[in-house]
Image: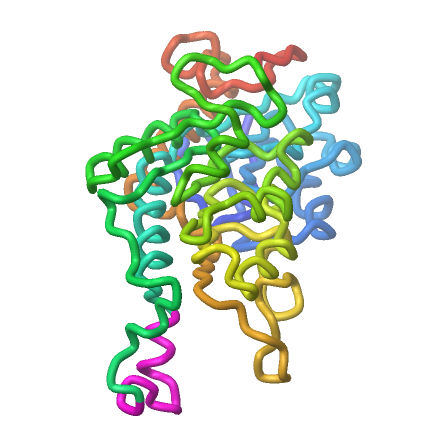
Amino acid sequence: MRHHVVFLEAANAPCVDFAFPHTYHRHTHTQAHEVAERIKDATIVVVGVTPVTAEHLDQAPYLQCLAITATGFEWLDRGAFAERGITVVNCPQNNVEAVGEHFLALYFSARKKTVEVHNAVTGPDRQWIQEGSLTPRWKQGPPLSCRQETLGIIGYGALGRQIEVLATGVGFSRVLIAERKGQNKIRGGRVLFEELIRDATTIVVCCPKEPSTLGLISEPELLMMKQEALLLNLSRGGIVCERALAAALKEGRIFGAATDVLETEPGGIGTTPLIPDVANGEEGIPNLTITSHVAWFSQQTMENLGRFLKLGIEGCVMDSLSEPSSRGTVIIHKGEVWR
């Protein structure tokens, strides 16, 4: 048969030449209310972070395979897809290298106040010219160097381990790995969650988004952190409480923060306490770097995505998903949940 492949978020997915007869339609972006109409004739759907729900499936009678390019897919209703016999595949650990490197970008940006200094230099007030030096902006004293840092990693999967390697490579002297919050039994090589929050000078959040991690970092945790602490979020919006983080930064309770994710995406003025409307008199957030969920984006990631999409989707069409080369892409197949 000739398959019809629909890409719901083509801006974030490579164009793949599948080895079976097919047509395809690539939508640059898709909002939730557009999903049902766009997949109604599809046999294969490629999606990133836009949820495809059970209600959508009721209007997609030809759908045989859903391929997910995003690393996280907490929205996936496994039971709904299994019940309908729809195969679900993904692209595991496709962006670990890129997101690990983005950790370094966010770390140096926050510790060196790159965004704040850039705005001071290029703004209409000509603050560098007027003040002569911008080093007084480090009100807590000169920034720590890497060898003075204690890195705390929350989420020690493939990404957490990659970040540990990179941080050690640039000179971080000590690395702490957090046990799960609320756990008193500590696995080897880990420390209590609260101990990491108290002792680390740079904390990076790279754990999955799930019910147990929503609001994982909020006001109590921010109050426990060192004044020189940096908080970096490379996971998902909602794991760090944005309102609490905005307050901590405005009050100078921690040194700075950087995030690649927001609770509401796409984000901008009015979507989060982290992006105030400064032009209309709202107080700005000092020493905060925000990137637009682009940590994953690199040539290597796109190559990885293309390879995994071919493995998973062609494996579904050719009924070869049980072979070792493509088995690791499978989430649901033939009515069974594999992982």
Highlighted magenta segment, given as a residue range: 116-130
Query: From the viewer's perspective, is 82 left or right of 331?
Result: right
Quadrant location, the N terminus: top right
Residue in the picture at 49% in, 31% down:
195
Query: Above or below — where is 38 with respect to 128?
Result: above
Give 26 or 208, whichever is nearer the viewer. Answer: 208
Residue 271 seen:
yes
Query: From the viewer's perspective, is 302 left or right of 241?
Result: left
Q: Position of residue 219 (x, y in %)?
A: 64, 48
Quadrant location, the C terminus: top right
Q: Position of residue 65 (x, y in %)?
A: 59, 26
Residue in the picture at 47% in, 27% down:
178
Q: Quadrant of residue 304?
A: top left
Residue in the picture at 44% in, 64% down:
287
Residue in the picture at 50% in, 40% down:
235
Query: Above or below — where is 208 with respect to 112?
Result: above
Q: Position of residue 176 (x, y in %)?
A: 39, 29
Give 164 or 26, whichever is nearer the viewer. Answer: 164
Query: Above or below — where is 302 with respect to 185?
Result: below
